[in-house]
Image (cartoon, rainbow, N blue to C red):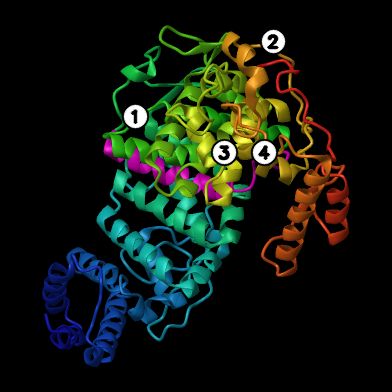
Amino acid sequence: MDLRVIIEQMETGEQDKALAVLQSFNKEMSQCFTFNREEGQERKEAKQQKHLGELVLSFLSRELQPSCLLACLETVRILTRDKQCLDPFISRSAMLTLAHYSGIAHLAAPPQGPLEESKVGVVEKDGKEEAADSSAMVKESSPPSENPDQEVIIEALKSICNILFHSQTAQVIAADLHFIDGVAERLKQCNHPTWNPEVRFFDLRLTFLLTALRVDVRAQLAQELHGIKLLGNQLEATLCLCWPEPLVTARAGYEGFPPEELPPLSRQQAELAMEILKILFNITFNTNRRKVDEEEAVEYRHLGALLRHCLMSRADGEERTEEFHSHTVNLLGNLPLPCLDVLLLPKVENGSIEYMGVNMDAVNMLLEFMEKKLDRGHKLKEALLPSLNLLTESSRIHRETRKFLRSKVLPPLRDVKNRPEVGSALRNKLVRLMTHIDTDVKDCAAEFLFVLCKESVSRFIKYTGYGNAAGLLAARGLLRGGRDSGIYSEDEDSETEEYREAKPHINLITGVVEEEQPNPMEGMTDEQKEYEAMKLVNMFDRLSRINLIQPMQLNSDGKMTEMTTEDLNKLATNPLLQSQEPSDPDSEDET
């Protein structure tokens, strides 16, 4: 429909005419999400859209019939999809108008309209605002009105989300007007039957955008508004959970059922839960490494119990279940490490995976999730690292978790004929990652295996080969062997008969038994050997002088340093110079 015709009808100020043209425009543009205009038309059409936006906002400042009000808000939603035409909507007065119709105007005043509250500032037609009466702020959750127009609320929320997504100016205004306070008030009413799931969803989507785009809003929700407790209650209500035991959850009406017998979450439940998980991720970011006080620890452990339930739940369809579990794993990685013990708290039941008397269902689910992401091989850094990091840190701090994962990932070594990176076992897949092109992926895989080896260099080399292990060992100054600073329990030896027999013939560099190779220096005199050594040194020296290579040597502290020409000459005069040998790979107890 021609924008000029719409504008002409809107300029008459008559609701009936405005309603007719807006409904036609909305129907025509309902599925339009991209705005690719030809160069000549772009400026003209953008100007017309901005003018239409101004006219719609002027209508929204008046008392409107419900149908006209809804049509105006639908038009705003469509117009705000175009980031080039946001100017009318990123003023303080326009944001106040939309906040009012969405029901989240908390500190600032809404315009005159059918949803008007008492003692609030009014947006005048010329755009000026009267001061809001701050005494009208609601401190506690107030009950919703009996019949709020939820279609109006949803359309206004969608418009605000569009605007915030596209405009940094609007983000600043939303933070200044304390939109988060208004949304939080309604989130407290999660169990109230008045609000339908779509209102809840867009309340959560708006909260996610605010916390993702504004660090100050993130901190406000986490601290002043007690966001972890607030959103934990939302998650609990969404999943219909009860607490048969402290820190142990169950689906209401399905107490005592094993996870695999629970019905899958509905699509609506899964969508709401994922929005909650994303917001919680934003407000708990960077908390896993810091110390928390007792009160915070209680909140995080309560949240951890909810996340365990999420991890053991299924959504409607494999793809949605995987997405749901991805958000759960991401959030679990934010929890303070000592609080992860809640994953192991449920009692061992029939059908549970038990290890050392502990329920390992959640840990096994994490391991299977990680292997699934690893097998897929797509965007490993984004997809794999959250679960791999979580398993690493859980293993570092919880002995039972580490021993269980070691039994699955690094079982007693029997295959000594194939290289550690060759094969389809999980160990082989992870060792292959240790030479991945992405440094973060490579380091994370190596760190996981190193922790499962209790940070013992000799054991690490035994399972991965010195060549694969060298990167991590060099970074830690452990190329001479030994153990890193982690504190681990002593465990009994689990060396297999096959490994014990093959051990004297294993090449520590590759980690496998290799056929004996002829000695290239056999039959040479000492003078010939010295001549070949000097030849090699001169070649190294020549290549290093043209900066093609940089010879390195191992210092006494186990770290690599550059070799000078003098160092090379010293090596040439004593080609059999030996460094300290790594300790026997099996001199320490096994896990």
Labels 3 and 2: the sequence-earlier one: 3
Say the numbered circle drawn on residue 314. 1
Q: Which residue is mark 3?
A: 445
Q: Amino acid at mark 4?
A: Pro
Labels 1 and 2: the sequence-earlier one: 1
Q: CA distance from mark 4 to mark 2?
A: 41 Å
Question: Are circles 3 and 2 on residues that touch, CB within 8 Å?
Answer: no
- Tag 2: Cα neighbours inside 10 Å, few (<14), some, or many (≥20)? few
Say the numbered circle drawn on residue 520. 4
Reply yes or no: does residue 531 show up in magenta: no
User: In front here: 313 or 539?
Assistant: 539
Labels 4 and 2: the sequence-earlier one: 2
Q: Amino acid at mark 1?
A: Arg
Q: Residue at x 72, y 30 (%)?
A: 457
Say the numbered circle drawn on residue 492. 2
On screen, residue 37 versus residue 343, left or right, reads left
With respect to residue 350, does 154 lie above or below? Answer: below
Element assignment for label 1: loop
Q: Residue at x 41, y 46 (%)?
A: 275
